[in-house]
Protein backbone atom coordinates (compact mmCIF):
# COMPACT_ATOMS: atom_id res chain seq x y z
CA UNK A 1 0.00 0.00 0.00
CA UNK A 2 1.43 3.33 -1.05
CA UNK A 3 1.97 6.41 1.04
CA UNK A 4 0.24 9.77 1.08
CA UNK A 5 2.37 12.92 0.94
CA UNK A 6 1.23 16.43 1.80
CA UNK A 7 2.81 19.41 0.06
CA UNK A 8 2.50 23.06 1.01
CA UNK A 9 3.97 25.43 -1.56
CA UNK A 10 3.63 23.18 -4.62
CA UNK A 11 3.37 26.16 -6.98
CA UNK A 12 6.79 27.52 -6.04
CA UNK A 13 10.16 26.58 -7.54
CA UNK A 14 11.16 23.84 -5.08
CA UNK A 15 7.59 22.71 -4.41
CA UNK A 16 6.78 22.23 -8.10
CA UNK A 17 9.91 20.13 -8.65
CA UNK A 18 9.07 18.10 -5.55
CA UNK A 19 5.53 17.50 -6.83
CA UNK A 20 6.81 16.22 -10.18
CA UNK A 21 9.22 13.86 -8.46
CA UNK A 22 6.53 12.45 -6.17
CA UNK A 23 4.17 11.96 -9.12
CA UNK A 24 6.73 9.60 -10.66
CA UNK A 25 7.55 7.86 -7.37
CA UNK A 26 5.66 4.57 -7.09
CA UNK A 27 5.99 4.60 -3.31
CA UNK A 28 3.26 7.27 -3.18
CA UNK A 29 -0.35 6.44 -3.99
CA UNK A 30 -1.63 9.98 -3.41
CA UNK A 31 -0.41 13.53 -2.98
CA UNK A 32 -2.39 16.18 -1.15
CA UNK A 33 -1.79 19.80 -2.05
CA UNK A 34 -2.81 22.63 0.26
CA UNK A 35 -2.66 25.96 -1.53
CA UNK A 36 -4.34 29.27 -2.18
CA UNK A 37 -5.13 28.47 -5.80
CA UNK A 38 -5.78 25.26 -7.71
CA UNK A 39 -3.08 23.96 -10.03
CA UNK A 40 -4.59 22.85 -13.34
CA UNK A 41 -3.70 19.75 -15.32
CA UNK A 42 -2.69 17.41 -12.51
CA UNK A 43 -3.48 13.66 -12.53
CA UNK A 44 -5.98 11.93 -10.25
CA UNK A 45 -3.12 10.93 -7.93
CA UNK A 46 -3.24 14.52 -6.68
CA UNK A 47 -5.97 15.78 -4.34
CA UNK A 48 -6.14 19.56 -4.02
CA UNK A 49 -7.44 21.63 -1.10
CA UNK A 50 -7.63 25.35 -1.71
CA UNK A 51 -8.20 28.18 0.73
CA UNK A 52 -6.45 30.58 3.08
CA UNK A 53 -3.30 28.87 4.37
CA UNK A 54 -3.03 31.51 7.07
CA UNK A 55 -5.99 29.64 8.59
CA UNK A 56 -4.56 26.16 8.10
CA UNK A 57 -6.44 24.82 11.13
CA UNK A 58 -9.58 24.89 8.96
CA UNK A 59 -8.08 22.01 6.95
CA UNK A 60 -7.59 19.80 10.00
CA UNK A 61 -9.94 17.00 8.88
CA UNK A 62 -8.17 16.67 5.51
CA UNK A 63 -4.63 17.19 6.77
CA UNK A 64 -3.86 13.48 7.03
CA UNK A 65 -1.10 11.44 5.46
CA UNK A 66 2.32 9.92 6.01
CA UNK A 67 4.66 12.84 5.30
CA UNK A 68 4.47 16.62 5.15
CA UNK A 69 6.68 18.64 2.81
CA UNK A 70 6.59 22.35 3.63
CA UNK A 71 8.09 24.48 0.85
CA UNK A 72 6.28 27.68 1.81
CA UNK A 73 8.23 30.91 1.61
CA UNK A 74 7.97 34.47 0.40
CA UNK A 75 10.40 37.33 -0.25
CA UNK A 76 10.71 40.92 0.90
CA UNK A 77 9.88 42.04 -2.66
CA UNK A 78 6.67 40.01 -2.79
CA UNK A 79 5.69 40.71 0.80
CA UNK A 80 7.19 43.99 2.03
CA UNK A 81 4.88 44.13 5.06
CA UNK A 82 6.78 42.43 7.89
CA UNK A 83 3.65 41.32 9.74
CA UNK A 84 2.36 39.48 6.68
CA UNK A 85 5.83 38.18 5.90
CA UNK A 86 6.06 36.56 9.32
CA UNK A 87 2.52 35.20 9.04
CA UNK A 88 3.65 33.33 5.93
CA UNK A 89 7.25 32.28 6.66
CA UNK A 90 6.68 31.55 10.36
CA UNK A 91 2.95 31.06 10.75
CA UNK A 92 2.22 28.55 7.98
CA UNK A 93 5.09 26.08 8.64
CA UNK A 94 4.42 26.17 12.39
CA UNK A 95 0.67 25.63 11.88
CA UNK A 96 1.49 22.72 9.57
CA UNK A 97 3.77 21.19 12.20
CA UNK A 98 1.07 21.53 14.85
CA UNK A 99 -1.50 19.83 12.61
CA UNK A 100 0.99 17.08 11.79
CA UNK A 101 1.48 16.43 15.49
CA UNK A 102 -2.26 16.44 16.20
CA UNK A 103 -3.01 14.09 13.32
CA UNK A 104 -0.21 11.63 14.05
CA UNK A 105 2.00 12.39 11.05
CA UNK A 106 5.51 11.49 12.15
CA UNK A 107 7.54 12.84 9.21
CA UNK A 108 7.81 16.60 8.67
CA UNK A 109 10.20 18.32 6.28
CA UNK A 110 10.53 22.08 5.90
CA UNK A 111 12.69 24.40 3.82
CA UNK A 112 14.31 27.10 5.97
CA UNK A 113 17.40 29.11 5.01
CA UNK A 114 21.11 29.37 5.60
CA UNK A 115 21.72 31.80 8.45
CA UNK A 116 18.47 31.07 10.27
CA UNK A 117 18.93 32.28 13.84
CA UNK A 118 16.23 33.21 16.33
CA UNK A 119 18.64 35.67 17.97
CA UNK A 120 19.64 37.43 14.77
CA UNK A 121 19.16 41.17 14.36
CA UNK A 122 18.26 40.52 10.69
CA UNK A 123 14.50 40.13 10.36
CA UNK A 124 14.66 37.42 7.67
CA UNK A 125 17.17 35.26 9.57
CA UNK A 126 15.35 35.80 12.86
CA UNK A 127 12.00 34.77 11.38
CA UNK A 128 13.45 31.58 9.93
CA UNK A 129 15.22 30.80 13.21
CA UNK A 130 12.06 31.30 15.24
CA UNK A 131 10.19 29.08 12.79
CA UNK A 132 12.75 26.32 13.23
CA UNK A 133 12.50 26.51 17.02
CA UNK A 134 8.70 26.38 16.97
CA UNK A 135 8.66 23.44 14.56
CA UNK A 136 11.17 21.49 16.64
CA UNK A 137 9.13 22.23 19.77
CA UNK A 138 6.35 20.02 18.36
CA UNK A 139 8.73 17.05 18.75
CA UNK A 140 7.58 15.25 15.61
CA UNK A 141 9.53 11.98 15.41
CA UNK A 142 11.20 12.71 12.06
CA UNK A 143 11.64 16.45 11.60
CA UNK A 144 14.06 17.50 8.87
CA UNK A 145 14.91 21.18 8.43
CA UNK A 146 16.81 22.09 5.28
CA UNK A 147 18.87 25.30 5.22
CA UNK A 148 19.75 26.09 1.59
CA UNK A 149 21.83 29.03 0.47
CA UNK A 150 20.57 31.01 -2.55
CA UNK A 151 18.27 28.63 -4.42
CA UNK A 152 19.02 28.00 -8.08
CA UNK A 153 16.55 26.91 -10.73
CA UNK A 154 14.26 28.10 -13.50
CA UNK A 155 11.98 30.64 -11.85
CA UNK A 156 8.98 31.72 -13.91
CA UNK A 157 8.79 35.08 -12.15
CA UNK A 158 12.49 35.96 -12.10
CA UNK A 159 13.21 39.49 -13.28
CA UNK A 160 16.05 40.15 -15.75
CA UNK A 161 18.17 41.75 -13.01
CA UNK A 162 17.76 38.70 -10.79
CA UNK A 163 18.67 36.37 -13.67
CA UNK A 164 21.87 38.33 -14.31
CA UNK A 165 22.67 38.22 -10.59
CA UNK A 166 22.25 34.43 -10.53
CA UNK A 167 24.50 34.02 -13.58
CA UNK A 168 27.23 36.07 -11.87
CA UNK A 169 26.76 34.13 -8.63
CA UNK A 170 27.14 30.84 -10.54
CA UNK A 171 30.37 32.07 -12.10
CA UNK A 172 31.76 32.78 -8.65
CA UNK A 173 31.02 29.27 -7.35
CA UNK A 174 34.62 27.99 -7.71
CA UNK A 175 35.71 30.66 -5.21
CA UNK A 176 33.49 29.19 -2.50
CA UNK A 177 35.54 26.43 -0.87
CA UNK A 178 36.46 25.43 2.66
CA UNK A 179 34.33 27.34 5.16
CA UNK A 180 32.73 29.28 2.28
CA UNK A 181 31.41 26.09 0.66
CA UNK A 182 28.07 26.44 2.42
CA UNK A 183 27.40 29.66 0.51
CA UNK A 184 27.39 27.93 -2.86
CA UNK A 185 24.17 27.98 -4.87
CA UNK A 186 21.71 25.28 -3.76
CA UNK A 187 19.79 23.82 -6.69
CA UNK A 188 16.04 23.47 -6.12
CA UNK A 189 16.19 19.99 -7.67
CA UNK A 190 18.67 18.92 -5.01
CA UNK A 191 16.48 20.32 -2.23
CA UNK A 192 13.44 18.43 -3.52
CA UNK A 193 15.33 15.16 -3.95
CA UNK A 194 17.02 15.49 -0.56
CA UNK A 195 13.62 15.93 1.09
CA UNK A 196 12.30 12.75 -0.54
CA UNK A 197 15.44 10.80 0.36
CA UNK A 198 15.25 11.95 3.98
CA UNK A 199 11.56 11.10 4.24
CA UNK A 200 12.30 7.57 3.06
CA UNK A 201 15.34 7.07 5.26
CA UNK A 202 15.69 5.96 8.85
CA UNK A 203 17.16 9.33 9.84
CA UNK A 204 15.61 11.03 12.83
CA UNK A 205 15.30 14.78 13.50
CA UNK A 206 18.12 16.85 12.08
CA UNK A 207 19.02 20.21 10.55
CA UNK A 208 20.65 19.89 7.13
CA UNK A 209 22.92 22.76 6.16
CA UNK A 210 23.33 23.85 2.55
CA UNK A 211 26.56 21.99 1.79
CA UNK A 212 24.98 18.68 2.85
CA UNK A 213 21.82 18.99 0.74
CA UNK A 214 23.43 17.98 -2.57
CA UNK A 215 25.22 15.11 -0.86
CA UNK A 216 21.94 13.72 0.47
CA UNK A 217 20.19 14.30 -2.86
CA UNK A 218 22.64 12.31 -5.00
CA UNK A 219 23.23 9.43 -2.57
Image (spheres, grey):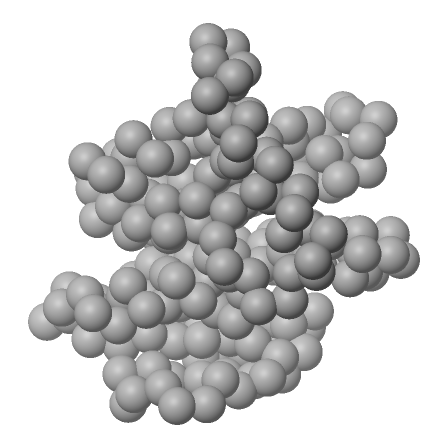
Query: Quick one: 140 or 108, which is closer to the camera?
Result: 108
* Left or right relative to 14: residue 215: left
Q: Which of the 4 image quadrants contains residue 47?
A: bottom left
Relative to 91, residue 170 above or below? above
Query: Quick one: 58 or 118, which is closer to the camera?
Result: 118
The answer to whether one can see residue 132 in this image is no
* Left or right relative to 69: residue 185: right
Q: Residue at x 37, y 28 (%)?
A: 212
The answer to whether one can see residue 44 in this image is yes
Relative to 77, residue 55 above or below? below
Relative to 216, residue 105 above or below? below
Query: Quick one: 19 or 143, which is closer to the camera?
Result: 19
* Residue most extreme to the top: 178
Q: Residue at x 46, y 62 (%)?
A: 15
- Coordinates of residue 34 in the picture (x, y in percent): 51, 75
Q: Residue at x 73, y 52 (%)?
A: 161
- Coordinates of residue 115 in the picture (x, y in percent): 64, 28
- Coordinates of residue 102 in the picture (x, y in percent): 47, 60
Q: Residue at x 52, y 71 (%)?
A: 11
Q: Quadrant of the C terminus?
A: top left
Q: Which of the 4 image quadrants contains residue 137?
A: top right
Amino acid sequence: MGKTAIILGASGLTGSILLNKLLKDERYKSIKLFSRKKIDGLPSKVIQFTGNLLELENFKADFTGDEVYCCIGTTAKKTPDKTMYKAIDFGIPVAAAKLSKKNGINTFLVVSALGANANSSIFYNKTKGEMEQAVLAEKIEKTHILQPSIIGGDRKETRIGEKIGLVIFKLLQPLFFGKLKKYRLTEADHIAQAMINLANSTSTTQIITSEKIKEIAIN
